[in-house]
Every structure is written in C-alpha cells, then in structure tokens.
Image (cartoon, rainbow, N blue to C red):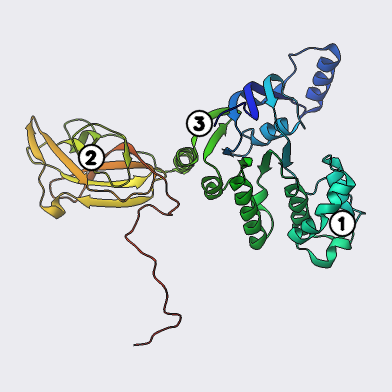
Amino acid sequence: MTGQPLIRFSGVGKDYPKIDTAARRLSTLFALVAGRADMPHFRALDGVDFELRRGESMGLVGVNGAGKSTLLKIIAGVVKPTRGVVEVNARVSALLELGSGFHPEYTGRENIYLSAALMGRTRAQTHEQVEDIVAFADIGDHIDQPIKHYSSGMVVRLGFAVASAQQPDVLITDEVLAVGDESFQKKCIRWLEGYLDGGGTLLLVSHSMFHVQTLCRRAMWLHEGRVRMEGTSFDVTREYLTWHEEKARRDKPAARPESGSVPYIVETWIEDGEGKGRTTFAMGEDVVLQGIAFGPDGRAPVILAGVVRADGSAVYGTHSNESGFAPRPLGEGRYGFALRLGAVSLLPGKYVARAHALDPEGLRLFDTIEATFVVSGETRDYGFIRLEHRWEPGRGGRQDA
C-alpha cells in the first residue's frame, strides 16, 4: 500500500487511575487537584506503534484486558491517549457498542434518524437510506415500535444496519460478529466482504481466529498493553493459538533420571530432510527428530517417539522395536537414533517432538525429552493433520444395500 496512512500510532500509551478502594479514590482526587502525575494507575496501552493504510484489513487479537478496546476507542476519539502520537486521516465508523446511543422511548425508525444525526448525517441524507437500513435490520413491524420493547438481538441488528449505511473510509469493530443469530452474522460477514472488495479499510477485534483469517490480511497481537506480534493474519493467529495451547498445558516434564543408573535421552534436535537443523517447516516437508540415548548395561534402550500439540494433545507416536529398529552404538553407552516423518501432513501450528527412553525390553519408561518445531502455512482446515480428501456431488438420496 502507498500514500499517507489513514491511521498511525507512534509510542501510544494510555493510563487509567486506580480507584478500586476508598483510599485510592481520595489519593487520585488529590493528585488530580494538585496536577501531579504520580497517581496510582493501570497501564492499558504502552508504546504501541502501527499503521493502517487504505484498503488494508487488520485483525486485532489478544486476551480480555490486553488493551484492544482501549486502542479502538482512541481511534474513534472516545478516549484520549496519555502519551504518544495518534494520527487519524480518514472518516471512521466505529461499531463498538451497537445500539448504545438509541433512545428507549423512540421507535426503531426514529432512532435511525437520531443515530445518523449523531454521526453527522443530515435528515435528507438519512431519508434516502432509511428503507435500505430497515431492510438490512430485518426486524419486521418492530421498526415502528419503541426500542425499549426490543430484544438485545433486535437492538444489535438495527445498530449494525445504521452504522453500515455510512460507508466510512475506515471501519473499526469490536466483537460485532459475536452477537446476533447465525443468519445475521452471515449477513454481517457478507457486508464486510463487500466493503473490503470495494476498497474499504477494516480494523477488526475478534476472538474468532476464523473470522480474523477470513476477513483480514494482517493481524496484530496485543498482550498486556504491548504489541507482542504483528504480521500476516495466518502467522499471528497461529502463534496466538499456540500461546493459548501452551498456557493450558497441565502436564509437566518428569524429573530427569540420574546419569548412568537407567536408560535416558541425552539430547534431541530437529532437522529437515537434508540434515540441516531447523525449527520451522512448511506443510509437506520432511521433519526428522534426531537424538542420542544412553543405555547403562551395554544394551540399546527402546525409543518411544512421537508428536504432540503444544497443549499436550497426542498426534502420533511409535516404538523403535515395533519396526525392528535398534539405535546405533556410538560408544560409552550412547546410542544414536532418528525418526523421519516424511511429507508431514500436520496443519500449521506449534508442535512438540517427544522422545522417551525405555528399558531394552520396552516395558518400563524412564525418561522424556522434548524438542519444539513449527509448521507454517495458510489453511482454514481444522484439527491436527490434513487427510487426503475430495468433495463430490451427493446422490441426493440414501442407497440401501
């Protein structure tokens, strides 16, 4: 993309005063009156830098409290940053809290005119669009009933219909696709796809990595108010999901055995099919787990090796003795082994290759060691592996034997 950025953040930070106790409320009040800057505060954003140019689509991901909503509110002008530079060179429409500006005593139709006026639209401009807005909201005769009688879903439908009619230069949304029924969500997605195809610029907050991958080319991961990663939507969502998997992991590695007493794994490492050490692979490449094991009694241990996801979910495992393989003697009780996974069909994500040392009979497990690797790529398939498949036209009816 070329030209001046529509949105630019440079070193942007936002602090909120802490007023969770009576004492803090008083100290914050005195600090504000005295003009001091040393009041207790919570740092919602810290040193955020990014640019968004015309025609780009960026997803914003992160756990609750990471600073995503604060960032959007700064762009929308609802909140002022504590420090840093913010440039907004575009007409922005913010779908943050749909329907929050509606008057409960007014009808849906009256609220269309009210909301459009708050967005800077004249009554004549709104009159030209009102039927399209009503059709998009699709709430039937309720459009002429007071808002206070609407369900929350009906309020959301009308709020999105009003906001989407503005055709802004930049559209920013905060979990708007997580509300409403399934048919309405599909309608919203179709509208967003059309908006992007028409050259619109989108900043989307969502906990749905599918929506981020589908609607956004780029993504930014906010963590504790800072930018943890920025890049393509597939790369960022993969790392974000991996972080969640590792966080959820409960199994801790067992303590390593004492050297020389029982079989154990000395070390492992990951290589590609050409013998070069690597930790990142594309789908379909060979991944080779290399390792050295120790046997205390002059006999080679049995090796159990396999792959798990970062959260510990098993993907595949195999024993060396099942294939009649014996690790190669290296001297001094050390034995070399390698497990080649040919043309792996693993889906993009972070994986852990595990190697376990068993006794020569393969009955008792003594040691475990791990080596991590990443499979990169762009796909919206689900699960751990890609199975060979093809779509075919159905028969249209059940065929009994």
Label 1 residue SS: helix
Label 3 residue SS: strand
Q: Quadrant of the N terminus?
A: top right
Q: Which mark is residue 289?
A: 2
What residue is disc 3 on? Answer: 229
Q: Is residue 78 left or right of residue 252?
A: right
Q: Measuring from the top left, give residue 171's x and y in whole percent.
A: 68, 41
Q: How busy is the neighbourhood of tag 3: few (under 14 within 10 Å), some, or many (20 plus)?
A: some
Marks 1/2: CA–CA distance: 65 Å
The residue type indicated by label 1 comes to Arg
Label 2 residue SS: strand
Spot the residue most to the bottom.
401
Determine the residue positioned at 83% across, 21% down.
26
Determine the residue positioned at 77% across, 59% down.
154
What residue is disc 1 on? Answer: 109
Q: How busy is the neighbourhood of tag 2: few (under 14 within 10 Å), some, or many (20 plus)?
A: many
Q: Is residue 387 above or below residue 203?
A: below
Lower position in the chain sequence, tag 2 or tag 3: 3
Foreground label between 1 and 2: 1
Query: Can see residue 61?
Result: no
Q: Is residue 135 above or below residue 221?
A: below
Find out whether the residues at labels 1 and 3 contact each other: C-beta distance under 8 Å: no
Q: Which mark is residue 329?
A: none
Q: Measuring from the top left, give residue 50's x and y in whole percent.
A: 58, 27
Spot the residue most to the right.
105
Q: Measuring from the top left, give residue 160's x and y in whole percent.
A: 74, 51
Marks 2/3: CA–CA distance: 28 Å
Q: Quadrant of the C terminus?
A: bottom left
Q: Foreground: 199 or 149?
A: 199
Q: Foreground: 20 or 43?
A: 43
